[in-house]
Amino acid sequence: MRRELIDELLAVLGPAGVIHEPARLLAYECDGLALLRQRPAVVLLPRSTEECARAMRILHRERLPVVGRGAGTGLSGGATPVEGCALVGFARMRDVLEVNAAERYARVQAGVVNIDLTLAAEKHGLFYAPDPSSQAACTIGGNVGENSGGPHCFKHGATTRHILGLVIVRDDGSILDLSLPSADPLGYDLVGLFVGSEGMFGLATEITVRLVPVPQVTETLLAIFTDLDSACDAVSDAIAARLEPSALEILDRLTIQAVEASVFAAGYPKQADAVLLVEAEGSEVEVEATLAPLRAIAHKRGAIDIRRARSAAERKQLWAGRKGAFGAMGRIAPDLYVADVVVPRTKLRELVAAATRIANDKQVKLANVFHAGDGNLHPNISYDRRDADEVRRVLEASDEIVRCVVAAGGSLSGEHGIGLEKQEFMSLVFSDGDLRAMCDVRRAWDPDGRLNPGKLIPVHVCREMRGTERPR
Amino acid sequence: MRPLEVVDYAKSLDCIHCGLCLRTCPTYQLTGAEPSSPRGRIYLMRAVAEGQLAATDPQYLQELDFCLACRHCESVCPAGVRFGEMIETARAGRERTQPRGFLARTARRIGFGTLLRSRVWLSLAASAMRFAQVSGAARLLGRLGRPLVEMPTVPAKAERAPLPSSTPAVGTRRGEVAMLEGCAMRELYGRVNRATVEVLTRIGFETKVPSGHVCCGALHAHNGELAGARELARSTIEHFERCGAGPIVVNSAGCGAHMKAYAHLLRDDAAWRERADRFSARVNDFSEFVAAELPMDVQGALGRELGTLAYDDPCHLCHGQQVRSQPRSLLDRTGAARVELPDSESCCGSAGIYSMLRPDDSKAIFEKKAAALRSCGADTLVTANPGCHMQWEAGLAREGVKARVLHVAEVVAAALRQARP
């Protein structure tokens, strides 16, 4: 990058806000999807909306591509830099601006870590419901970009249901303030449109989120199964029985072993082939009304033991194990490909089995840990990126899993987004016409296609769009 | 030098890039910069090993220096990355590939090669430091004298006297322990050493101190002087083998963590590795040992004297040795009122000699700790490591917070004194 341009950015953001040294830039070449890497031209770390806007105006004048980044924990390559881009990170925008307990909302800067928001709300007897497994690291801004989920989204819904307002820095550096005093959108619901736009509509810098009251009672159960199929069936039964616990999670044997070997060892029995982690919340009566039939279902489906967390500490431990599962897989191989698909909840057993079969065919190591209640599977494939043949087999396996799931009526992504990872699969579920409609919306936000270019929309549709646009 | 020899490539592959370490890392908290995080540093180390980045790249070296080696990241790493060992290896690699300037080299030679190896020199240096502080000469030294001006005053010579080589048990003798007198502890916090002996002997343990021992080599290892660290490890093992085979009690968290890891340090030396294993099995932190051996609760009347206590976990005690409950339970058993210090497992910025090498970063990191202490309203801050002790004393004075700083051993000794007049 030109020295004068760096100096100009330094004048706006200060020395702590501009990273341009090649060695330091290297650390930004990938997010949680380490398979895809590209060094950015510069990394900008603004401290405020105004700083971000001023920097964006410079980038707009220079016609530079811009990629946003929260904590770099995303798994679909949403924050993978594109060639020559300015990567705008939010790791210095970490202020909780306001917690309004009476009105049940909080206003935060985009770089606030998910768990820090929850800790800030907890003091007021409230919490922020979407809790991705990476919540100890990921940012609210990143959650907005990807419309992230998490175990408790089974009951509470994904990020989009919890965002009340946004302040957005647009592609040209103008500031769009969509923070409204009421929860009901006025006019076009631009906030709803923006959530999940994967950094292609603008950069959210301040976010107003809905907070919900901490439930009177929370109960956590761990049902232990001797086979994965039965655990899946138990979840299908629970859904069919119209039960609504707040979370229904399954971990398989390989995952249990990795977790139990880690600092997050939760006391999952190492000999079990699957555990089902269940949480219910509400009044004592409501919780019991959910858990009693769930226990019966688990027993009917062959659970050999059902344990109950006896204290908040035990509950925390059970969840820490679940949430550390991705990282714990580092014990199995240097890299992990976390697939993310949604299956019809009546077909959990057969599609989990299909994923296992595909992994076996491709001779890759598969572990399953997933949001079973939502039908959101995460087939985790361990590999070593230095082994080109293994990488090829991993990609083939994930390709087949996605196709198999879509063929069975499922969806491409539950919570990780499309990014670079799944863009070509978009054509499996959308026609070119559908995708063109998405492109139209995108162009309204970002006419030059500078924001996170080359993500989400399949390449052939993009090309087509570019060929036909701007007859002016 | 081949890149693989300057970083621990195999360990870098354990990192799966999940990012759970980011929020706990003090330097990432300070800067929000990925290369200043554990995940980022590991990424750079791996790039060095794979030939993508020169081992001499100044920015890479800068990130190695910036790290406090607090090992907080290890406590939250689901993949079990041993970052402490990695940063030691990378820093040793740095010393071999990138010669430092004349001044730095000389200072390191004096510090690691002379002072930390000889009680005579160390003691002279302590006297000289005290003189510079008390006479005001330190102020005249400008930038060089700044660390001296800012650190607590080195105690007078009498305070720095050696511990007796053996102190008999008080009352019924229950056994015998060896104790690490330490390099810095003796010169800066002799009172903590005396309190340690007092507690150990009062609970029935004859306490031996190996004569002629100076330093365990922890500071060497943390700062890339692995050859010196190995030499001092072997010498430490020999010294303590001469004191029998009983428990070794260490009242400095950094030293204890390091002494428990001698087997890793000496892994390439088959004969020493076994000796190191046996040695490390004997090492206990003060709290670990006393919490297990204290015969009964010692409900003293400490309240009036100490007020409310807050315990700050030294990094190398909680992250390095997984000792968390013992110091708290000991303090509670003295009957003192205690509150939890928010974020007690985060680094105070002392980090061995870091506070002297990077005073501005060290102070910036401390600010949060001072705020935490203010918020919990404790009158006395309790720690278990001389570096942290100094950082807290200097930091609280600077921030104008009126609170005492004590070592766990001092609190327990005071309680025992009151309980058994």
Image (cartoon, coloured by chain):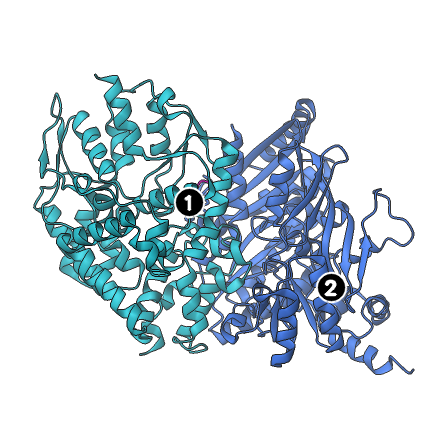
- Residue found 21% across the figure and 16% down from its top: B421
Viewport quadrant of the N terminus of chain B: bottom left
Amino acid at circle 2: Ala
Nearest the camera: A414 or A144? A144
Query: Which one is in front, A443 or A386?
Result: A443
Residue closest to the eye, A242 or A35: A35
Residue under the point 50% across and 76% down: A388
Decide: few, some or many residues near mark 2? Use Cα within 10 Å; few <14, some 14-19, many ≥20: many
Chain A display color = blue
Query: What residue would you read off at disc 2?
Result: A53
In the image: residue A2, left or right of residue A60: left
Q: Chain of mark 2?
A: A
B8 left or right of A31 in image: left
Residues rendered magenta in the picture: B342-347
Colour seen for chain B? cyan
State whether residue A465 is above or below residue B69. below
Closer to the observer: label 2 or label 1? 1
Q: Are marks 2 and 1 on the same chain?
A: no
User: Which element type, helix, strand or loop, lies under badge 1?
Assistant: helix
Say which mark, if any, is on residue B239.
Answer: none
Residue annotated with mark 1? B395
Q: Chain of mark 1?
A: B
Whole-number angstrom distance, CA of label 2 to CA of label 1: 37 Å
Which residue is at 54% across, 71% downward? A25
Amino acid type of the residue tagged 1 in the rendering: Gly
Locate residue B22, reporting x and y percent: 52, 55
